[in-house]
Image: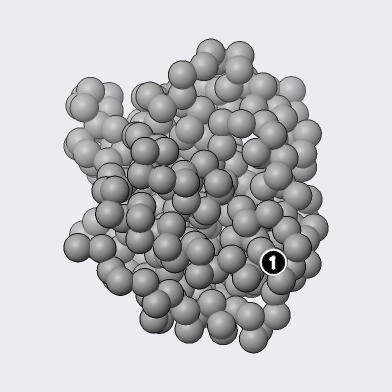
Amino acid sequence: MKYRRIGDTELEVSEVGLAVWPLSTDVWKGSDDEALAVLKKAYDLGVNFFDTADVDGHGRGEELLGKAFAGNREMVVLATKVGYDFYNDPGANGVAGARRWDPEFVRYAVEQSLGRLGTDFIDILQVHHPTLEAVQDDALWQTLEGLRDEGKIRYFGAALGPGVGYHDEGVLAMRKRSATTLSATYNLFEQDPARKFFTVALEYKTGILVRNPHANGVLDDTVKSPADLKIGGYYPPRTAAWVEEALAKRRKLEWIRERKDMMFPQAALKVYLWEETVPSILVESQDPAQLEEFCDAPEKPDYVREEIAEIAEQYRRNFDVPKAA
């Protein structure tokens, strides 16, 4: 494992971080003990950065992290999110449902998160799927600054979504709110708008956290046909036509694996790590063996500028694949 500093902070995080939602939401079919085993396996592999949200499993993700790292809290970097009011809206799930940004609610949500995590501070608190109005809301960001000054959070950022997009929200969060991190969907097939964030992030010393790096499983060898498509968790839902197009694009990218002699899931991660403003990629896995493969990626050979440019050109041409209807 290798580690990178987030912006100009003192936080050093593993280049491969772990998204906790696959272990804490309805897509997880195992027990809590099995989920804890995956978290501990990740830690043993060198992962020190874990990302969850208070709404994931309505607190379950935070509770799992609290149990997993109760004895070595100082050795891990924990990121969570607030914004969805599942306390009053049982239907809130991180995609739909009530969102609140008022200071009273944010402070309440943070206190609940601290309790579930079993800690007295959160390393990175992210505003969960902020609207443009939320990014422009001075009271919200003043509240976050207050929580930071009180030591309840160390840094704050924003997690864009749900789904792909939200260019204006992301740029404003960096430029106006000095977000320490910006979490966004970014993979070989869906590079916009995230790739437009890199230059802004470099200027404002924001760390771009990569979500859905393996494109719903197409890039990690778990989806080889529409019938294999993962159900739940991802947004927006994917169609069979989207999967067929993505698989055709992947075939056009086979050279990135062959040229560096590595597994395709590792190759995808190495492409993202070429960006210096990406401190960590939040991989999604329920399988310890797959997780081990992901965690080997940082040690693989780096791509060079010409290869990254070649990928960018393929992306511009949609990989010479007809777009799905």
Q: Residue 311: where, in percent of width, then height?
A: 54, 77
**Residue at x 27% of width, y 41% of height:** 95
**Left or right: where does residue 154 sit relative to residue 212?**
right
Q: Is residue 91 above or below residue 95?
A: above
Residue matched to label 1: 258
**Residue at x 69% of width, y 66% of height:** 258
The amino acid sitting under disc 1 is Glu
**Left or right: where does residue 295 sit relative to residue 320?**
right
Q: Is residue 161 above or below residue 81?
A: below
Task: Confirm whether residue 107 shows in the render.
Answer: no
**Residue at x 52% of width, y 53% of height:** 219
Closer to the camera, 111 or 68? 68
Element under disc 1: helix
Q: How many marks on residues?
A: 1
Closer to the camera, 234 or 104? 234
Q: Is residue 263 above or below residue 205?
A: above
Closer to the camera, 233 or 9? 233
**Residue at x 77% of width, y 39% of height:** 45
Q: Is residue 309 above or below residue 201?
A: below
**Left or right: where does residue 222 sit relative to residue 53?**
right
The crowd level at tag 1 (other Cα within 10 Å; few <14, some 14-19, many 20+) is: few
Q: Residue 221: where, in percent of width, then height?
A: 55, 46
Q: Residue 317: where, in percent of width, then height?
A: 39, 81
Q: Residue 10: where, in percent of width, then height?
A: 70, 57
